Image (cartoon, rainbow, N blue to C red):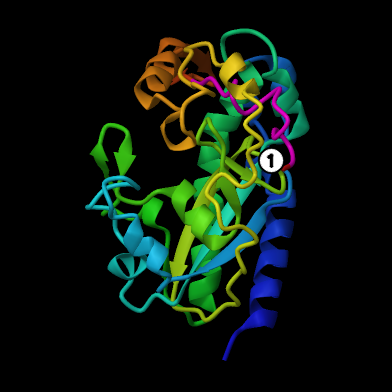
Amino acid sequence: MVLTDEYEALTAGLTDYLRTAPENRVAPAAAIRPELAGMPLFTDPLFAVGNAADPLYLGLKSPEAVHPEHLSPTEWLPEARTVIAVFFPLTEQIRMSNRNGQAASDEWRHGKFEGQDFIKQFTAELVRRLEAAGHRALSPELDPRFRMITPLVPNWSLRHNAYICGLGTFGLSKSLITAAGCAGRLASIVTDAPFPVTVRPYRDRYAYCIRCGKCARNCPAHAIDPAAPADRAKDHVKCQVQINSFKQPVTAGGRTITRNGCGKCQTDVPCMSRI
């Protein structure tokens, strides 16, 4: 039996949770600038569901896809039946703030760091609600088995999972382009709940990318080559070096956090907030 009504109630409840959670705003003690205190981080999330037995998951073990040590849903949870992918669109204030300059805006850094803290809380709440309903569930990225196989390759890829679940396709920058654009962050849950599987509205990995090259022109590291084949257009090493070059220690609320970031390929592009 497919639990359609339960899934719809779950996602509606979690959307309300995001709208009202105080952690979805910058805490005054963490604000890089005083006027950023209380700034919202994410707008309503997008959800999609994949079949845990989808053969594309095994395909991610190919060296040309992710890595032979990439784990499939049933390796995370043997009873897995479905996988939930969630996209958290950054607010318009955060997206627009990052359209100019070489370095990431303060707002963008909050979206990356405080935003990721909130996503962990949201994901844990999603697991808690599933378990309270009698299901088994876990988040690979919060699981102690989650690790980086190489400095840039994890044993669970959020972007590839979201693609398989029907949430979006890749761009030349390797960001995931969703119905709410590419400027946001991702989470995932593996569960034994038989939720309705999202029908993928695409067949090509780059279906939503018009190859306009704007992300390449925005990239301060020149890490994207729009003339290259799509699957080889991004130099991830150059990208990471650029992100790390913008590390900025910020002291607020009695603690110092070193925030890095860039995001120039996700802002001031046609796919920033839509397909």
Is residue 147 or residue 48 the one in the foreground? 48
Where does residue 256 sit, x and y in percent of width and height? 45, 17
> In the picture, which quadrant includes the N terminus?
bottom right
Q: What SS does tag 1 mark?
A: loop
At horizontal 32% and vertical 63% (from top left) the residue drawn is 58
Is residue 92 or residue 167 the one in the foreground? 167
Can you see residue 164? Answer: yes
> In the picture, which quadrant includes the C terminus?
top right
Residue farthest toward the bottom in the current orientation of the protein:
1
Residue farthest toward the top in the current orientation of the protein:
101
Where does residue 237 sit, x and y in percent of width and height? 35, 22
Q: Main secondary structure of the magenta part?
A: loop
Looking at the picture, which amino acid does disc 1 mark?
Gly
Q: Is 270 within the magenta?
A: yes
Where does residue 47 sit, x and y in percent of width and height? 63, 59
At horizontal 52% and vertical 76% (from top left) the residue drawn is 132
The segment highlighted magenta reads 261-274
Where does residue 44 sit, x and y in percent of width and height? 73, 50
At horizontal 73% and vertical 44% (from top left) the residue drawn is 43
> Does 1 sit left or right of 190 as displayed?
right
The residue carrying mark 1 is 181
Residue 217: which quarter of the image?
top right
Is residue 62 or residue 46 the one in the foreground? 62
> Does 36 sit left or right of 122 as displayed?
right
Q: Residues within 10 Å of mark 1 (few under 14, many from 20)?
A: many
